[in-house]
Each structure stands twice: as C-alpha cells, then as structure tokens.
Image: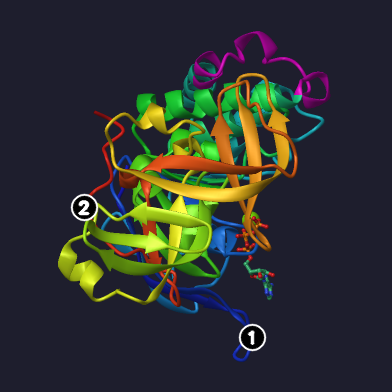
Amino acid sequence: MAVVTLDQITKQYGPTGPVVVDHVDIHIADGEFMVLLGPSGCGKSTTLRMIAGLEEISSGKLSIGNRVVNQVPAKDRDIAMVFQSYALYPHMSVAENLAFGLRRRKFAAAEVDRRVSEAASILGLTPLLERKPSALSGGQRQRVALGRAMVREPMVFLFDEPLSNLDAALRVNTRTEIIKQHKRLGSTMIYVTHDQVEAMTMGTRICVMNAGKVAQIGAPLDVYWEPADTFVARFLGSPPMNLASAMVASSATGHGARSASLESPLTRWSPAVLGSLIDKKITFGVRAEDLFMNKAALGSEPAGLVRGRVIAVEPLGAETLLLIEVEPGVEWTARLPRHVPVSTDEIVELYYPASAAFIFDATTGRAVIGEARRDPRQ
Ligand SMILES: Nc1ncnc2c1ncn2[C@@H]1O[C@H](COP(=O)(O)OP(=O)(O)OP(=O)(O)O)[C@@H](O)[C@H]1O
Ligand SMILES: [Mg+2]
C-alpha cells in the first residue's frame, strides 16, 4: 500500500507539441480510491499512464510510497493496471491467465497456487478456472482481468475505464465488485472514468479534470454540492446544473439575482460579498432536482422563480423531465414528479429554495463562495 503524489506533473508531446496534462497536483492517500473524472481528451489516461510508467513525464515529480519514481521503469513501480481492453490470453485457461504474470516473475509454484485460488474465490471465478476466455461472458472476462491485477498484490492499482465494454447490468455488478475489493484489500486505487455515476459511487475522492488541468478535488458529495466552477457544476449532475446570466441587485428585502426570466433572493452570501457584485453580471445556477412547480412545496423557505416556455415534457416513469427555454438558446431542465400537467409552448413558472441557488463569476466561471449549501448527508 502506498501514498501516490503528483507534484506539478506535466505532459507535452514533443518540444512544441500540445501540453495535454498541465501542472497537475494530486495527493492520493494510502488506501484511498481516487477517481480521475473528466470529458474525453482531458488527459485522464495520459495522467494514469505516467503514474504507471508507460508514458514519460515531461516535468514535475511523481512519488509512490516514499520514492520518486520518474525514472523507475514500469515493471519496478509495484503497480498493476487494468485497461478498458483487457486482452486475456485466448489459448490459456482462466487459471493460467491468472497465474501467468506470477510465473513469469518466478514466484514459487505454491505461492502462485495460493494467490490464484484466493483471487478466484474472491471474484467468484473458482468454477470457471478451467475455461478458456472464449467461453466466458464479458463480465466474467473483466473479473479475470481484475484477478490478474489482484494476484500481483501491488502497492497501487490503476484502472482505465475498465467497465466501459460491459452492458448496464454487468457494469453495476462489476462496479460493486471493485468497491468490495477495495474495502477488502485496502489498496490505493486510481480509477479513470468519464462516467459520473461511477465516480460518485466508487470514489473516496474525485479529481475532476478539464483540458489537462485539475478543476477540483474533493469527496463526491462535496464536489456535487460545492462545485468550484461552472465546468464542474455541469459535468457532475445529470441533467447538468441549469445556468443563466443574471445581475445582482439590492432591494429593501436584501440582495437578489435578476434577469428577464428569473428572480431569486441570495441568502447564502454575506452582504460584503454581494455588495461588491451589485449591478454586475453573474452566472446563476440551480440544479434540476431543486426546481418545483408548486411554490407551496417549499414551505416557508425564501423562494426564487424562473419563467420559461415549455420545450418538452419527458415522462421517464419514476419522474418527469420538463425542459423549458428561459431565454433564447438557454434551456433549463427540471426533475419533477410523475404527472406534469403542462404542454409544449406553454409559459410556466418554476420555484426553487433560495438556498439551492449558486452564483459564479460571469467571466471566469469560478464559484462565488458563500455559506455551505444545506448538507445533504444530515
Ligand atoms: N501520442 C500523442 N501525441 C499527441 N497528442 C496525444 C498523444 N496521445 C494523446 N494525445 C492527446 O492528449 C490528450 C489527452 O488524451 P488522453 O488519452 O489522456 O485523454 P482521456 O482523458 O483519457 O480521454 P478519453 O476519455 O477519450 O479516454 C488528447 O487531446 C489526445 O489527443
Ligand atoms: Mg482515456
């Protein structure tokens, strides 16, 4: 087990090529499950491959345990990596696939047997040990790939989108399996995905990446409830956070955010913070699950409102998504209960608790820090 530290890690392909990982700082504690999350091309795999030793580090310092490993070859870093495409040896049985790496490293036969049977039993592969990969389901193959990494008993596990080839049900099962293994082994795990549900459910912390840079690092719910900027606010959450331009105004009842289509008290920010924003443009945000059709649902809480033209009503069974256009080209989505009695082109008003509002700098997109949003874990 080990601490992994990325200190200003940078990757540039060629002296004049693009910088695809840009001064990344991540400190991963011993036994932590760190998820690297971000859109395609943001540098997740490149970061992971530099940790693995499969890609040269252009600048910065990488430590595993107490050792700087920039110059240490992959095979001596004591890590195991599970890729999206987990090429098993087709002519070998499951048992042989699991044992192969250990045999090549000249482990004693008894030790190989012990580790293989232990991994097989943990992963539910014992009845399949004599099968060839061609006679396994996708999920079973994925478990063999995981087992192959587990038998190495490495200090650090690295995963690069290991579930993306699986169907939805298998993905959920295997996800649970990996979480169980993490609890059991207590190893440090670094897991790359662009799937926010995987990130939210698996990570002890999430590192959200955007265009080669770290956008935010934190516990899943902290990142969800306190996004550092509009990128994180939209990337985490499905549907993404609703955003619109507004102005900060002051009135007899306090400060508020206003635009042609919305009006909200701003209750989470101090008068000093809001004072500096008066008459300035901000980006205003509310999550889809915080929008309601009936103001009464909010009880005595101060409420904000947003007005828009209905674009679509999408009943999903358990809930209904209502899409409204709040200004030309700006769509908001509300997650509402099953029955939503409106039709397309109707103008509707939706309400939200003022405590559910977010504000961001209109230029940089950085969150304006206020009092913590209500803690959903209480
Ligand atoms: N050998 C290379 N030469 C130049 N650019 C490269 C090279 N390999 C990768 N890149 C670029 O580096 C960037 C980051 O790629 P990377 O594979 O790390 O992204 P990713 O976050 O893993 O994306 P995905 O979710 O699609 O796997 C991309 O823009 C990619 O085009
Ligand atoms: Mg990738």
Q: From the top left corner, tell me how far across and down residue 66 is, in percent.
A: 26, 58
C-alpha separation, residue under disc 1 versus residue under disc 2: 42 Å
Tag nearer the camera, 1 or 2: 2
Q: Residue at x 71, y 32 (%)?
A: 314
Q: Residue at x 28, y 48 (%)?
A: 29
Other residues around mark 2 within 10 Å, as few (<14) / some (14–19) / many (≥20): few
Instruction: Identify the image quadrant of residue 183.
Output: top left
Residue located beneath label 2 in the image: 371
Range of residues picked out in magenta: 119-137
For the question of whether residue 51 can be seen, the reply is no
Q: Is residue 261 above or below residue 22?
A: above
Element type where label 1 sits in the image: loop
For the question of whether residue 171 can be seen, the reply is yes
Specify whether 289 is left or right of 354: right
Q: Is residue 32 above or below residue 18?
A: above
Q: In this view, does 245 lie above or below 4?
A: below
Amino acid type at mark 2? Glu
Q: Which residue is drawn at 30% across and 74% down?
A: 278
Q: Which mark is residue 17?
A: 1
Q: Which of 265 and 11 is in front in this view?
A: 265
> In the rendered structure, does residue 124 fall within the stretch colored magenta?
yes
Q: From the top left corner, tell me how far across and down residue 19 is, in percent.
A: 56, 80
Amino acid type at mark 1? Gly
Q: Does the residue labelled 1 lie within 8 Å of ligand 1?
A: yes
**Placement of the C terminus among the 4 image quadrants:** top left
Mark 1 and mark 2 lie on one chain; the one further toward the N terminus is 1
**Placement of the N terminus among the 4 image quadrants:** top left
Q: From the top left corner, tell me how far across and down residue 303 is, in percent.
A: 35, 43
> In the rendered structure, does residue 55 fall within the stretch colored magenta?
no
Q: Residue at x 73, y 23 (%)?
A: 93
Image quarter for ligand 2: bottom right
Q: Nearer the viewer, residue 292 or 365?
A: 292
